[in-house]
Amino acid sequence: MSRLARLLFILLLIIAAILISATTGQLPAQVASHFGAGGAPNGWMSRNDYRLVILAFAVVLPVVVVLGSTLLPRFKDTRINIPNRDYWLAPARREATFRYLAAHGYWLGALLVVFVVGIHLLLLDANATQPPRLAGQVLATLLVLFLAALAVWIATMAIHFRNKR
């Protein structure tokens, strides 16, 4: 499972970086990057600044999340906050626990990449019209899907660590 999660994460990072780099040139010199109620823009940035910010959110942030989960074995056990910590970090289960946490981190990283790419595509669409207008219903749908996936991610971890096997 960890291999699949890692492969998917890396593949999504590459696709996101290429997609964002390839499509940012379609944006106007001044990008409507923040929108208020009703989808009207109320914040702007240069195309180059937008490219840097969206790449940071699509690539750097997920990498930081994944690094955090894969570096957990280097932390003191008392700094790792999971239910039944003494049980799950006992020598017999320690390695499997850290593998599970790393895989779970890759899944969260992949989820973040997909969400930020979705935001980028929405902003591309919003800036394609004059005046720019954000599709609020599409944004709401994207946000609900992201939060639902995040809830599944949290529930999966909670269920896994709830029971002592």
Image (tube, rainbow, N blue to C red):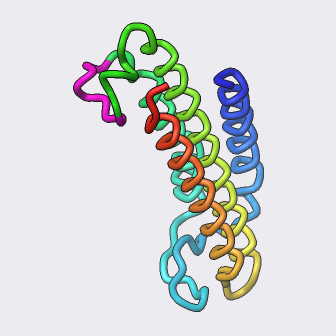
Furthest residue in direction left, as rendered:
78
- In the displayed structure, does residue 162 sit left or right of residue 40? left
Q: Nearer the viewer, residue 102 or 43?
A: 102
Residue 68 lies in the magenta stretch: no
Does residue 128 lie above or below 78 as drawn? below
Count of marks placed on residues = 0
Taking the spot 62% from the left edge, 69% from the top edge, the residue there is 144
Is residue 138 or residue 153 the one in the foreground? 153
Task: Kindly identify the residue that appears in the image at 56 percent across and 43 percent down.
Answer: 156
**Is 83 or 29 nearer to us in this picture?**
83
Of residue 157 and residue 22, the one placed in the foreground of this image is 157
In the image, which residues are magenta?
A: 75-83
Instruction: Report which quarter residue 7 is drawn in.
Output: top right
Residue 43: give x, y in percent of width and height: 48, 77
Q: Residue at x 75, y 72 (%)?
A: 125
**Residue shown at the point (36%, 22%) measured from the top left:** 87
User: Magenta region, mostly helix, strand or loop?
Assistant: loop
| Above-or-below relation of 100 to 54 | above
> In this picture, is 2 found above or below 126?
above
The answer to which quarter of the image holds residue 71 is top left
* Residue 136: quarter of image: bottom right
Q: Which residue extends farthest bottom?
A: 38
Q: Is residue 106 left or right of residue 84?
A: right
On-image quarter of the N terminus: top right
Decide if residue 82 is on the left or right side of residue 48: left
Question: Against 38, is 77 above or below?
Answer: above
Q: Give the percent coordinates (x, y) of residue 83.
A: 35, 36
Point out residue 85 in the picture as x, y percentages from the top left corner: 32, 27
